[in-house]
Image (cartoon, grey):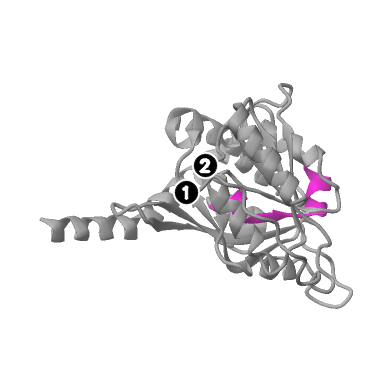
């Protein structure tokens, strides 16, 4: 993949009437400039071009930072900041990005290896930020779908497991039944930010789960589901390599919200995970059988 920063894009479609007037994507980075062109190109091809990207860069080397400088010079919708040591880790970088973003903006949090699933997805997602009825209230969250992606044996990108939020009536009940909004596919609106404005410091791997659980304490929270595959997500990441710590953090997050009933959403969360992986595992077994 070329690491040359793509050129800027010309202005295009206007804001959907009544929708959010700002969308900021916060992307933590660390020497990941070889991954970023796919993310950048997928955004520059969007039918709705009024997004902004803020890279929060860890202690990367000069080659990576030169790449960021070149990109931000060519396309002013991209900016970057060095990560403040007072905000350590990935979620610390995300908190730094929140503080640097206007409150009226909607937020998306992507990684360096994520990219938009299609050229119209941001326009479609932002339409869902409008009131459903004239004079109605704005949603606080717009929850879309995502899909994990890896590299096949032939080196081509291969889409895998789909991730989604299974709504079971109310937002809080859905969380209790083990479903969680995928943070890469969830637009976080100004209303949600007024309720919970930071990821909690004790969490290194599951601060996104804790964030969505803390939001559920507000009875007036409005979470709108949208049947849209918004983002394709790389499967690499530190969280998948620290299973024990992740399990401890997930238990802590559920315990802080649901008390002694923590084990119910904890168990259902992983039952859902196993169930969602079933089709992919069955396909893999069939392909292995054919190979033999």
Q: Residues within 10 Å of mark 2 (few under 14, many from 20)?
A: some
Report the residue that reaches farthest toward the right.
135
Q: Is residue 21 left or right of residue 24?
A: right
In the image, taking residue 139 as reference, residue 182 lies left or right, namely left
Q: Which residue is found at the position 77% from the left and 61% from the top?
A: 50
Q: Which quarter of the rendered picture does the C terminus lie within?
A: bottom left
State the image coordinates of residue 49 (x, y, percent, origin top left).
73, 63
Residue 165, given in percent of the width and then of the height, sits at 56, 58
Q: Disc 1 to disc 2, how far (Cα)?
A: 7 Å
Which is nearer the eye, 201 or 58? Answer: 58
Which quadrant holds residue 60? top right
Instruction: Tell me what residue is drawn at x 80 percent, y 71 percent.
Output: 14
Residue 185 magenta: yes
Residue 5 visible somewhere in the drawing? yes
Q: Is there a contact, CB below 8 Å, between mark 1 and mark 2?
A: yes
Q: Where's residue 228, x and y in %?
A: 58, 68
Secondary structure under the numbered disc 1 in the rendered image: loop
Tell me which label, 1 or 2, sits earlier in the chain.
Answer: 1
Local secondary structure at mark 2: loop
Location of mark 2 (residue) = 34
- Is residue 255 shown above or below 282? above
The quarter of the picture where residue 200 lies is top right
Residue at left offset 71%, top offset 61%? 9
**Residue furthest top in the image:** 85
Question: Relative to residue 41, is residue 30 depicted above or below?
Answer: above
Q: Which residues are magenta?
A: 179-196
Q: Kindly tell me whether residue 180 is visible in this rendering.
A: no
Q: Is residue 224 magenta?
A: no
Residue placed under numbered mark 1 in the picture: 1
Q: Please state the horizontal and vertical placement of residue 109, each as a whole percent of the image.
A: 65, 47
Q: Is residue 111 above or below residue 248?
A: below
């Amino acid at each position: 993949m070329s690491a040359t920063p793509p050129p800027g894009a010309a202005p295009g479609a206007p804001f959907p009437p009544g929708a959010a007037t700002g969308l900021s994507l916060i992307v933590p980075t660390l020497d990941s400039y070889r991954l970023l062109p796919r993310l950048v190109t997928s955004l520059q091809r969007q039918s709705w071009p009024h997004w902004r990207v803020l890279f929060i860069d860890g202690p990367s080397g000069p080659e990576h930072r030169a790449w960021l400088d070149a990109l931000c010079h060519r396309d002013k919708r991209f900016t970057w900041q060095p990560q403040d040591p007072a905000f350590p880790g990935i979620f610390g970088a995300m908190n730094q990005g929140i503080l640097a973003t206007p409150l009226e903006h909607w937020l998306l949090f992507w990684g360096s290896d994520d990219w938009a699933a299609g050229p119209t997805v941001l326009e479609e997602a932002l339409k869902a930020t409008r009131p459903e009825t004239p004079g109605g209230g704005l949603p606080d969250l717009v929850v879309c779908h995502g899909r994990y992606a890896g590299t096949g044996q032939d080196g081509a990108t291969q889409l895998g497991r789909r991730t989604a939020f299974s709504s079971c009536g109310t937002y809080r009940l859905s969380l209790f039944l083990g479903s969680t909004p995928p943070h890469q596919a969830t637009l976080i609106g100004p209303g949600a930010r007024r309720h919970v404005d930071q990821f909690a410091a004790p969490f290194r791997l599951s601060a996104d789960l804790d964030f969505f659980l803390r939001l559920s304490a507000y009875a007036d929270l409005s979470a709108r589901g949208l049947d849209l595959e918004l983002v394709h997500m790389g499967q690499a990441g530190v969280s998948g390599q620290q299973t024990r710590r992740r399990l401890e953090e997930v238990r802590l997050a559920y315990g802080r919200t649901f008390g002694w009933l923590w084990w119910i959403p904890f168990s259902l969360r992983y039952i859902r995970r196993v169930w969602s992986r079933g089709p992919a595992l069955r396909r893999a077994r069939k392909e292995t059988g054919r190979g033999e």
